[in-house]
Image (cartoon, rainbow, N blue to C red):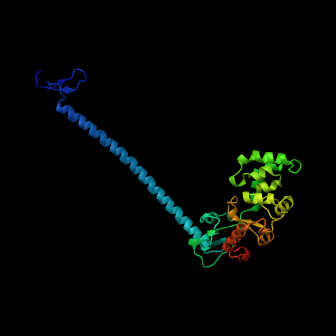
Amino acid sequence: MASGEPHPAADDGKFENASGEPHPAADGQRRKEHLKHLEATQKEQSSVQSEEIEKLRQEVRDLSQENESLRKAYGSQASSPGPTTSSPGDVTVPPFLPYGHATSYLGSPTGSSTFIPGQTAANLVVVVPNNISEIRRSLHALFTPLLEIPVMANPQNHLATLAALAPTLPLQLKPTELQLRTPHYAYIDMIPSPLLRDRLITIGPANSNTFMTQVCTIACDIEDTGQMTVWGEDWLNEFSWEFSADVLERWGGWLLTREWGQRANFWRRQRGAPVLPAWEA
């Protein structure tokens, strides 16, 4: 074999010239293989990207169809009688709650409200009363261990059971320090308002028992004459509660503080009812 001709390398079979350097033909072959590998990788990436783009396009189409269905649904509600009312943006939201909370009270059609003429579909929301009996059943289920013990006969057992229940309860129902150290009417524990629970304990057993058995329909199985309305599905949020004018007249000021009257007026405006002047800011 001539000295200038390529010959197989002894160790790997690659072509080398006499000086031991790789032959240009071998370099060209490697470059071709590298380019083929790059092209295959790019094609694979392009295919994956195309699939992702198509998925995104399909999601956009699905969302557009869903939005169109919702637009038609709310448009039909605005043009027919139903439990609709003006959006919270049309009224003054009380300063004790950040704006935007009221827009979440969209309930299932379990009750009725008043249709306010002159509003458009863009600023109408469905706001209906929640089912008081269902709320009461949910609360009783949460507090079953507490309701099974004789509270008045053994108040310390009541307080110990309440403390043991605390980790399982929603934030609005977790007992306060006053609840855990002061014997009280057990049904007070089922009111999803820490401040109201503490005020009921503070006014003493006689007054608190009267309030519970005459007003608090969400906790006590008493006749519902409209003492308390819970708007929408978020019944754990006390902003969704409305006490009646009679309840506010009797219990307002010394038990029910000013914000309860302001909340009542907020919801009265929503359904077009006259506001209670005594509770206007």
Picture quarter with the C terminus:
bottom right
Q: Position of residue 97 (x, y in %)?
A: 64, 64
Lateral position of residue 174 relative to residue 54, left or right? right
Residue at image location 70% in from the left, 55% down from the top: 172
Q: How many marks?
A: 0
Q: Position of residue 143 (x, y in %)?
A: 78, 50
Residue 176 in the image: above or below residue 76: above
Can residue 159 be seen in this snapshot? yes
Can residue 112 be seen in this snapshot? no
Q: Quadrant of residue 57?
A: bottom left
Lateral position of residue 255 relative to residue 231, left or right? right
Q: Quadrant of residue 269?
A: bottom right
Q: Position of residue 204 (x, y in %)?
A: 84, 59
Task: Name the one closer to the observer, 242 or 84.
Answer: 242
Q: Position of residue 215 (x, y in %)?
A: 81, 64
Residue at image location 82% in from the left, 63% down from the top: 211
Residue at image location 76% in from the left, 57% down from the top: 198
Residue 141 in the image: above or below residue 77: above
Picture quarter with the N terminus:
top left
Residue 27 in the image: above or below residue 248: above
Task: Name the one closer to the observer, 152 or 225.
Answer: 152
Q: Quadrant of residue 94?
A: bottom right
